[in-house]
Image (cartoon, coloured by chain):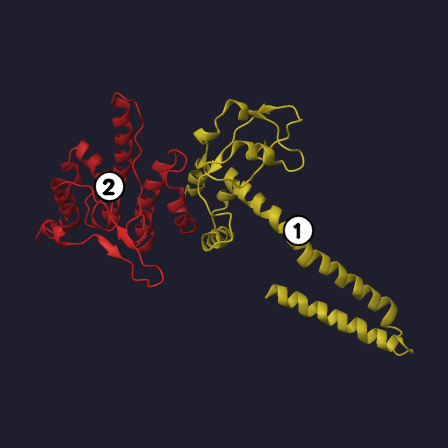
Amino acid sequence: MESQYAHLFSVDFNVMSDDPDLPAFITTELSFTFLDFQIVEKILLDRNFDLHNIDEQSRIQQCFNIYPGMHSAFHKLASTDHANFEHEDISKLYTAAQNLGQESDLRKSYVLPLIEDINCRTPLDLIFEDNVNINFAWQFLYNIKDYPFGHSGNIINRIIPKAI
Amino acid sequence: MPDLDLFLDSRLKTSTHLQSHWLAKQALKNKSKQIVKDHYYDVTLGEAWEDKNNLVDRLFDKELFKKPMNIKYFDIPELHLNTPIGYEFWRQLGSTPESDIFERKVIQILINYKWRGFKPLIFVRFVIPYLLFIATFTVWSNFFYTRRTNGWYFYGNLTVCTMLLLWSVYFIAVEI
């Protein structure tokens, strides 16, 4: 399958609302590089692609990217069963991001964002929409449990009843 | 999901905004404080950036002896509200086979919070009507039933029977 990268620039990401009572634009801002996009396409399309081929820095970089549809890399992972990775890899990403902060001069703890896509769905929503993978969902919840106040409670509250 | 209770408990978070030294020692109001897991606590609804003076007025008694205090937010909003998310949360909590979840501090606090609102409603909608129903039945069985063919007792019997019927309809209606 050909890369969709070239087509990205023909898409207007300023989407007008269909609701006549609430005319509005949804403006998305994207943040990724060509290399990042290629890697994500590999993850999504190539069943044999091994995530461990990517170095740790690039993997953390992926966690901060915003792709078309306001998808994060976690959305991409949650929406495909092609990705050749173990669920513990999510934990490794969170740990690596935390260590990255500790090693920097600022000695800050970096937190990985959990964002909603253009349809207001988090990666956890995607997991609970399709065939629920409890381990995958738990890896997210386990790793954000110690994150600071206000991190993502307002967007994950709707999955708590499903998780019970 | 196994260990979800662990996650919920862990989202009782301290906000840096409320880590002022004058909030570190306070005394809970005796009237509203409750106990869970051997800890005294009180609950209030607050904004993410809550006015500290309002918070102190709502939760603490300035006259009492002050003790070390932790002020924490439960960082998952809406579960305590009567919204679709809140309804679904309580529905699932009521039918979960994972009884361990009820051992968790945050779940007990949420249940106590809801109970505080439900308790008066249960008294008004169930306990008081039931006591009135029992009283009506006692009056009917002791005074009217045996004399129902005598004079005005006939009409009294009809009136009290109608009342009993109405109470029964009420109890069926609230159950439905």
- Does the image show residue B153? yes
Residue B115 position in % (x across, y down): 60, 47
Is there a contact, CB below 8 Å, between mark 2 and mark 1?
Answer: no
Chain letter of mark 2 equals A
Q: Of A30 and B166, which appears nearest the observer?
A: A30
Q: Amino acid at mark 1?
A: Pro
Q: Colour of chain A?
A: red
Q: Is residue B174 above or below residue A82?
A: below
Q: Is residue B53 above or below residue B159?
A: above
Residue B120 numbered mark, or none: 1
Judged from the image, the secondary structure of the residue bearing numbered disc 1 is helix
Q: Nearer the viewer, mark 2 or mark 1?
A: 1
Q: Looking at the rendering, in which quadrant would you find the C terminus of chain B? A: bottom right
For label 2, the residue is A86
Q: Is residue B169 left or right of residue A44?
A: right
**Among the chains, which one is yellow?**
B
Q: Of B19 and B13, which appears nearest the observer?
A: B19
Residue B53 position in % (x across, y down): 55, 32
Looking at the picture, do discs 2 and 1 lie on one chain? no
Residue found 65% across the figure and 23% down from its top = B65
Q: Is residue A41 above or below residue B6?
A: below
Judged from the image, the secondary structure of the residue bearing numbered disc 2 is loop
As measured in the structure, the alpha-carbon distance from the residue carrying label 2 to the one carrying label 1 is 51 Å
Q: Is residue B24 left or right of residue A30?
A: right
Q: Amino acid at mark 2?
A: Glu
Residue A135 position in % (x across, y down): 32, 44
Q: Residues within 10 Å of mark 1 (few under 14, many from 20)?
A: few
